[in-house]
Structures are given as structure tokens and as C-alpha cells.
Amino acid sequence: MTVAGVAIILLGTGAAALPFLDRVSGNRVVGSLLLAAGIVEMLGALLRNQTRFLALVAGAVTTLAGALMLINPVTHFLPTISIVTAWLLARGVVLALSIFQVRGSVRRWIAISAATDIALGLLLLVGLSISTLIVSLFGPTPEMIASFAWILAISFVVTGMLLLEIASCEREAAEDE
């Protein structure tokens, strides 16, 4: 579980590099990052004692978003944002549902992760109409791409921290037995 948490945080640093890539490469990188994060998240879910099913669903949502981006790479910025917005909102809802199945610090970290993904998804959703106008008139701007990269990176880092907390709690539980 610790390895999964560290891996997800490292994927977050990869997301922060998106502004330095062209559109096609950036889209492939986002798809690859999401796919890798989803697989790591699902493997971590298999190690969990509580919320295993919902954790698998959250990982599957991430994997699906990455696969969609890799199967149909587009050169337009807005479809990428739409997939990531849907991913953040869906994943946030799944995590929110799992809050009621755990106790203690893991519950707090799941709530933080769910709230982060929902808030980031809503930020993208609200900004989408403004982005549509800007991209239609001027093309994607470096600032928009940088903002998007940070949203992706923040979600990955918070998810990684959640997995590290779960690993810590499971180690403590194993020591108590």
C-alpha cells in the first residue's frame, strides 16, 4: 500500500510537467498517467480490508478515463478537460460513498480526497464554458494547460497521501494483533 501511495504521488509530479508538452504528447501523457494511477489504485484496493469494492470502482473509473484518452487521442484541449472533469466528479462521488464504511484517520483522508476531486471537477466544470470561448478564439493558452496540469497533480498527490494513510493504519492494526 505504501508503494502504491508513493507511485501515485510520483505520477502527480509527471502531471505537473504537462505544460512543457505539445497537445498530442500531452494528451497521451495524461491518458498514460490516469491509466497507471488507476491500475495502481486498483492493486492498492485489493490490499484493503475495508471499502475494497468502492476503492476498486474508484480505480476502475481512473483506468477508464486513461484508456479513453489513449484509445482516442485528440488534439483538442476541451475533450481532454471533459474526460478529466467527468473522472474527477465520478471518482469523488465514489470516494464520498465509501466515507461511511470506515472510521478514524482513514475516514478523514477519504473525505479529503473525495472533497478535493469534487472541488477540482467543479472548478473545471465551471471554467469549461469560459475555456470553450477562450480556446475557440485563441487556442489553448499555456496558462490554461498549466492550471489543468496542477489540477491533475493535486488529485494524484491527495490520492497518494490517502493510500499512505491507509498503509499506516493497516500496519498499526497488524502490530496490535
Image: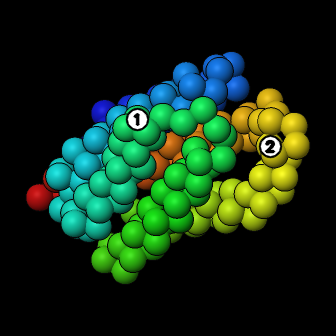
Q: Does 145 sit above or below residue 162?
A: above
Residue 137 percent across, percent down from the top left: 88, 43
- Estimate the spatial distance between the alpha carbons at disc 2 and disc 1, rounded to whole Å: 22 Å
Categorize mark 2 by other alpha carbons within 10 Å: few (<14), some (14-19), many (20+): some
In the displayed structure, would residue 168 be above or below residue 48? above
Query: Which residue: 18% across, 50% down?
Result: 47
Question: Residue shown at 50%/28% (left/top)?
Answer: 29
The reply, left or right, for residue 55 in relation to residue 124 is: left
Say the numbered circle drawn on residue 52: none
Query: SS class of the residue under badge 2?
Result: helix
Taking the image as drawn, is residue 78 in sight?
yes
Tell which circle, 2 or 1, labels the residue nearer the N-terminal end.
1
The residue most toward the bottom is 100
**Residue located 62% across and 60% down the image:** 121
Going 78% across and 60% down the picture, which residue do you hit?
Answer: 129
Left or right: 37 as drawn, with respect to 73: left
Please name whichever residue, 49 or 91, is drawn nearer the observer in this view of the structure.
91
Residue 119 drawn above or below residue 138: below
**Front in this rendered view, residue 30 or 138:** 138
- Residue lying at the far left in this picture: please name it: 177
Up/down of 94 relative to 173, above or below: below
> Mark 1 Cα within 10 Å, few/some/many (few <14, many 20+)?
some
Numbered disc 1: secondary structure = helix
The amino acid marked with disc number 1 is Leu
Q: Read off the residue under disc 2.
A: 135
Residue 166 appears anywhere in the view: no
Which of the labelled discs sits on residue 70, or is there none? 1
